[in-house]
């Protein structure tokens, strides 16, 4: 039996997602370096948590790593905690 007020996600499954691509700048500045690319992987747990890792080459040729964790509510709101190196 379910507790009063408890939320369920009836169609939620655990899934892995991979994203990769490039991006464009809205201007062409001389200080922009390197190829603009990114890649990321996320794991969605079966209930309500998403954990992700992303890497990208920023506009100044610096390698950047990001880690994020999101906790989703039944109403669709999310609490996101992230850190970028």
Image (cartoon, rainbow, N blue to C red):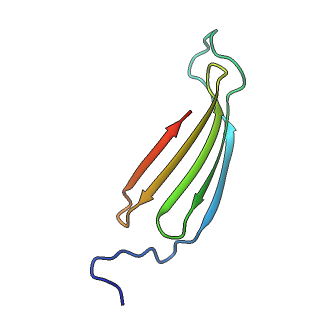
Q: Quadrant of residue 60?
A: top right
Residue 20 placement (x, y as % from top left): 69, 43
Residue 58 placement (x, y as % from top left): 62, 26
- The residue depicted at 41 percent of the width and 76 percent of the height is 8
Q: Quadrant of residue 25?
A: top right
- The residue depicted at 57 percent of the width and 39 percent of the height is 66
| Depicted 6 relative to depicted 82: above or below | below
As drawn, the residue found furthest toward the top would be 30
As drawn, the residue found furthest toward the left would be 4
Q: Quadrant of the C terminus?
A: top right
Locate residue 48 relative to residue 61 in the image: left or right.
left
Locate residue 83 relative to residue 42 in the image: left or right.
left
Residue 21 placement (x, y as % from top left): 69, 39
Locate residue 13 relative to residue 6 in the image: left or right.
right
| Depicted 46 relative to depicted 85: above or below | below
Q: Quadrant of the N terminus?
A: bottom left
- The residue depicted at 62 percent of the width and 42 percent of the height is 54
| Depicted 31 relative to depicted 48: above or below | above
- The residue depicted at 60 percent of the width and 11 percent of the height is 29
How many numbered dots are placed on residues in this image? 0
Locate residue 34 relative to residue 81 in the image: left or right.
right
């Amino acid at each position: 039996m379910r507790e009063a007020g408890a939320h369920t996600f009836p169609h939620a499954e655990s899934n892995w997602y991979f994203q990769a691509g490039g991006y464009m700048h809205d201007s062409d500045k001389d200080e922009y370096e390197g190829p603009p690319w990114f890649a990321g992987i996320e794991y969605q747990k079966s209930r309500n948590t998403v954990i992700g890792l992303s890497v990208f080459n920023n506009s100044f040729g610096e390698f950047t790593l990001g880690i994020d964790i999101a906790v989703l509510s039944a109403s669709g709101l999310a609490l996101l905690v992230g850190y970028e190196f």
